[in-house]
Amino acid sequence: MPGIAYFSRSLLVALAASLAASLAACGGAGDGGGAGAEPIAETEQPVRGGTETTRIGVVEIITTTQCSGVMISPNVILTVGHCLVGALPSGAKSGVVDAISIQYKFPDGTTREVAGDEGVSVTLWPSYTSPTDAANDFAVIKTNGRWTGTKSTDYAYIYTDTMGAYSRYQLYGYGHNAFGGGGDGVLRTGTMEVDWFGSHHFILIGRGARACRGDSGGPWTVYESTSGSEMHVAGLMSSVVLTPGGYCGAEGANARATRLSAKIDWITQTTGARCVQMKSQTTSRLVTRCFDYTTLKRTVRDCRTKAALGPEQTIDLSTGYGNYKCGNRYQEQCVDDGSADSYYVESCQ
């Protein structure tokens, strides 16, 4: 098989069928599509690849290994446990990590790095055991400060609605794109078909797109807005069956993904992030948004005169209100949308 022949710009693969599922209470964490135990053997290794792209919130993580992850708030990153266990002392489930580099490549091409000496803490999911246990292959990273230059549209939403609602699951990762290795460190994307899903993880089949080493922890998305302002993440890449001696998954190989909807309470408890379930303004599907801002200060101004149209407003963000960008929105609301009526000047606390 040619080394990099399995990802092209015409790659996107439709799912074989929509999976029926019932939305459970508390964010859909209980909906499942399998009968009994998951239908694949415990023979996986941690590993993806794809079409080169840029995407909000997806980061590259380098410790004792190379992985991917996704930002959900100004200082919280989600990834899988096997990417970080080697950076902690033997047997530890949490700690401050010095030997780590996290890079976020902004959609405009610039890169921001957070290193261990800036203050990075890591916490593994309490039941983490190994990458073969996708239901428990999960971890969070918390940085001391916010990422310089990021804004609310750089953070992903956690998808908490029924898994069968979409016909496409798309993966993003910084892994290799050749069966013999190489091409890593570049964000790529591709799709896979869903084969089975349960409360804490789901399984996909690699037909066309493949997962490769370095893509572990990369987000599986069910929806991305055309404006790039919303990305709904259902899970994280955990593991896939590799080709013998290779860096990428075999044709038709089962890939496991860690499902996020059942882990939101723990994310909140562990990181202190405020995670609120709401309906997406663009899809009306249930999503959870996490942030560490509590208060929005906003002044409404006239597009023509730029004069304030009333007193400053104070909005409690814990209610789930999501229409804010913590800055001057003149360009967006007066120029880009063509209305030229009024715009917001916002600050977040």
Image (cartoon, grey):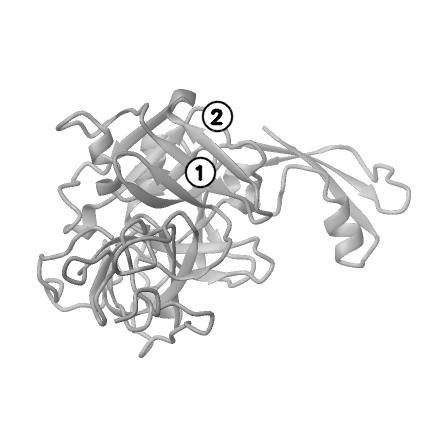
Q: Is residue 321 left or right of residue 6?
A: right
Relative height, residue 85 to residue 331 (above, below): above
Relative height, residue 279 to residue 343 (above, below): below
For the residue carrying disc 1, how many other residues have a C-alpha within 10 Å: few (<14), some (14-19), or many (20+)? Answer: some
Q: Earlier in the sequence, mark 1 or mark 2?
A: 1
Q: Secondary structure at mark 2?
A: loop
Q: Secondary structure at mark 1?
A: strand
What amino acid is at disc 2? Answer: Gly
Classify the position of the N terminus by image quarter.
Answer: bottom left
Mark 1 and mark 2: Cα distance apart in space = 14 Å
Relative height, residue 104 to residue 169 (above, below): above
How far from the left and from the top, in percent, is residue 332?
Answer: 72, 50
How far from the left and from the top, in percent, is residue 248?
Answer: 25, 59
Query: Any mark on residue 103, and which?
Result: 1
At x 46%, y 62%, the residue is: 223
What amino acid is at disc 1? Answer: Gln
Residue 229 visible in image: yes
Q: Is residue 270 left or right of residue 185?
A: left
